[in-house]
Amino acid sequence: MNQPRLGFIGLGLMGHPMTRRLLEADFDVTVWNRTPEKANDLRDAGVRVADYIGELVESVDVVMLCLADTDVVDEVVFGTEGVAAYARPDQLLVDFSSSDPAATRDFAARLESEAGMRWVDAPVSGGVAGAEAGTLAIICGGENDDIEALRPLLAPLAARVTHMGPVGSGQVTKVCNQMIVGCQAAVIAEMVALAEASGVDAGRLTEALAGGFADSKPFRILTPRMAASDFEAPAWHLRTLLKDLDMAVAQSQRSGSATPMSGLAAQLMRAHANQGHAELDPATLVEAYRPSRRQ
């Protein structure tokens, strides 16, 4: 695939910096976003902004999605005047969103049946910092030839691209990733609150435990924010992590596996989200355990 024209749909926390990385790598990029104002700075930088999805699809070779959840992917691809209405057999759809694996397989089969357009699920891990630096881990499901052709396009975005198997395999792997992240977030909140209640300076936990078995990226990111009650400018949202844990539980039911820890973490996050924290940083989970907040 030689310098294909790219279309990017979804300019949220991840999609915006990913689009900028592609532009800086000299790719021809067209974008569409439900909130057009989010594309203003990209337009100034040289990105073309489509007025509607069909305009984008008709002018590109590869359509990339980075959307909030499975329902939004369904709407953007198969809704009235969505991607499927304009798709061509020589195009690829690359879905960076974290979507339900079973739904992803259904979407891929439907899109190829209706329009001849092939689907690669390519969820990402690494957060906003990874998107800005081009160091994401991208986990792919799809046909080998399609993914090999996509590697030059993904190079500005990722430190590593791994092909996990057929369509849907990337989403299953991302669910596995989020099970670890979600359960860690829940226990880190308990840990910080316990340290505080026991008279330990929680702000020094990352220093004290660095390099040990408890060390991890979630630990290094969440612990200082929890200890300092630094909840401004969230790099991710509680609702997103909850959505991913719910997908893990759903996938476990389909596969006959068991996910008791992920299910419990989801219920804890659901209770916290229902207290008005869904759009806030997962670091706010610590507030559920602090004695002054429980009274």
Image (tube, grey):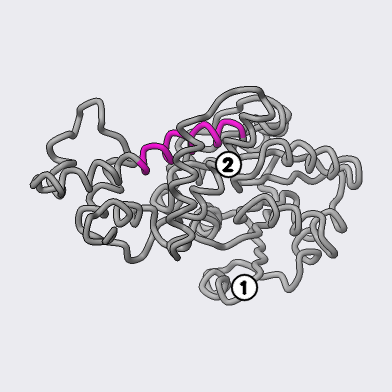
Residue 83 % position (x, y): 80, 56
Cα separation between marks 2 and 1: 22 Å
Percent x, y of residue 29: 64, 59
Determine which residue is flagged by label 2.
123
Q: Secondary structure at mark 1?
A: loop
Q: Residue at the spot x=49%, y=52% of the render?
A: 270
Task: Give the amino acid at mark 2.
Answer: Pro
- 184 or 62: nearer the viewer: 184
Secondary structure at numbered mark 2? loop
Which residue appears at 48% of the width and 60% of the height?
274
Query: Which residue is denoted by mark 1 in the rendering?
Result: 35
Q: Residues within 10 Å of mark 2 (few under 14, many from 20)?
A: many
Q: Residue furthest front?
A: 295
Which residue type does callout 1 highlight? Answer: Thr
Magenta region, mostly helix, strand or loop?
helix
Q: Range of the magenta residues?
A: 172-186
